[in-house]
Amino acid sequence: MQQKRNIQIIEWEDLDKRKFYSFGVFMTMAIRATVYPATLIRTRLQVQKGKSLYTGTYDAFRKILGAEGLRGLYRGFMVNTFTLVSGQAYITTYELVRKYVSNYSKDNTLKSLVAGGSASLVAQSITVPIDVISQQLMMQGQGEHLTRFKTVSGAKHPLYFGQTRDIIAQIFAADGVHGFYRGYVASLLTYIPNSAVWWPFYHFYAEQLSKMAPSDCPHLLLQAMAGPLAAATASTVTNPMDVVRARVQVEGRRSVLETFNLLIREEGFWGMTKGLSARIISSTPTAIVMVVGYETLKKLSLRPELVDSRHW
């Protein structure tokens, strides 16, 4: 019999789906806009050789802002917004798989692990082509010498999608359709474990915090604290493969194993930690906003007859 939990989880069958999807789009957009600059910085740090361009996260932020302005921190953002589709696919898959697994097991860790991994598999199948394009756009400006593709219309045609068309045309000319799925395996090896690790740790940290906190402490506060802890844990575990993924997609490499071995030979163990601080910095507000937003979203989307049954 499942042990009674201090923090009651709102499950899929408790939700009004129309509210859930309507509010979910706005929540996802807000999260992406908030953390995108850190994502761009992480990508440039991971792709550079040694410290050839930036010495760290703050140095990258300062140099990009100084040389390229605020717009430089949002290169590729408009293309990246198409991942709203994958975000909704992720949420739906996670909730449906949790419900399915609950038919066979009541263990929350198992449900979270299987659902998180499955959700990431579905989402990455949609996200990778968008990531490939947006990452190439991220590298324009100071980082353009680190990538194979360069925009040719940026100076004469400032409209954003002119640069996007340049990148798409160059990727297709060089690699065909396959080029848009470059790094797909590396992405799966990065994000499936990341997602599978994040959810169990999120619930674990929330439970542990609830045991230490006063009984009248708002559950949302505990969940907002648990999210960043889970994100830091998952980011640390999966960062080596995230570095490999970034290099495969930006540099056009074909072999994940070859890229991994090359990184170890050239930069040693510390090469595996590239961009980790930027990743944790980006994942921390992401986790807070996502947890607060997602749990609030679920609360707002509760079926009317269940609204008064959940402690908040």
Image (spheres, grey):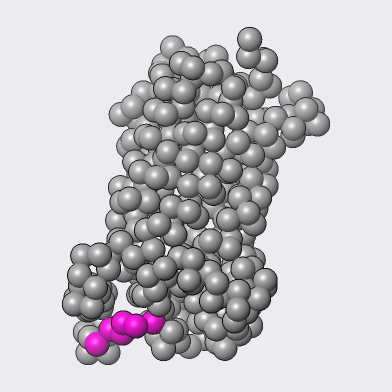
Residue 250 lies, in percent from the top left, at 40, 74
Most foreground residue, 54 or 26: 54
Q: Quadrant for residue 256, please give it.
A: bottom left
Residue 24 lies, in percent from the top left, at 38, 40
> Residue visible at 55% across and 72% down?
261
Label tally: 0
Q: Is residue 131 left or right of residue 265?
A: left
- Using the image, determine if residue 20 lies above or below residue 74: above
Q: Quadrant for residue 235, please give it.
A: bottom right
Q: Is residue 81 left or right of residue 170?
A: right
Q: Does residue 150 belong to the magenta stretch?
A: yes
- Using the image, determine if residue 200 lies above or below residue 14: below
> Residue visible at 54% across and 32% down?
112
- Using the image, determine if residue 167 lies above or below residue 294: below
Report the magenta stretch's main SS. loop
> Residue visible at 27% across and 89% down?
155
Res 224 seen here: no
Q: Quadrant for residue 159, please give it.
A: bottom left
- Using the image, determine if residue 228 lies above or below residue 298: below
Q: Is residue 80 left or right of residue 5?
A: left
Res 191 seen here: yes
Q: Does residue 53 belong to the magenta stretch?
A: no
Dividing the image into 4 quarters, which one contains the C terminus? top right
The magenta span reads 147-152
> Residue visible at 58% across and 63% down?
240
Most foreground residue, 307 or 267: 267
Farthest residue in the top direction?
A: 1
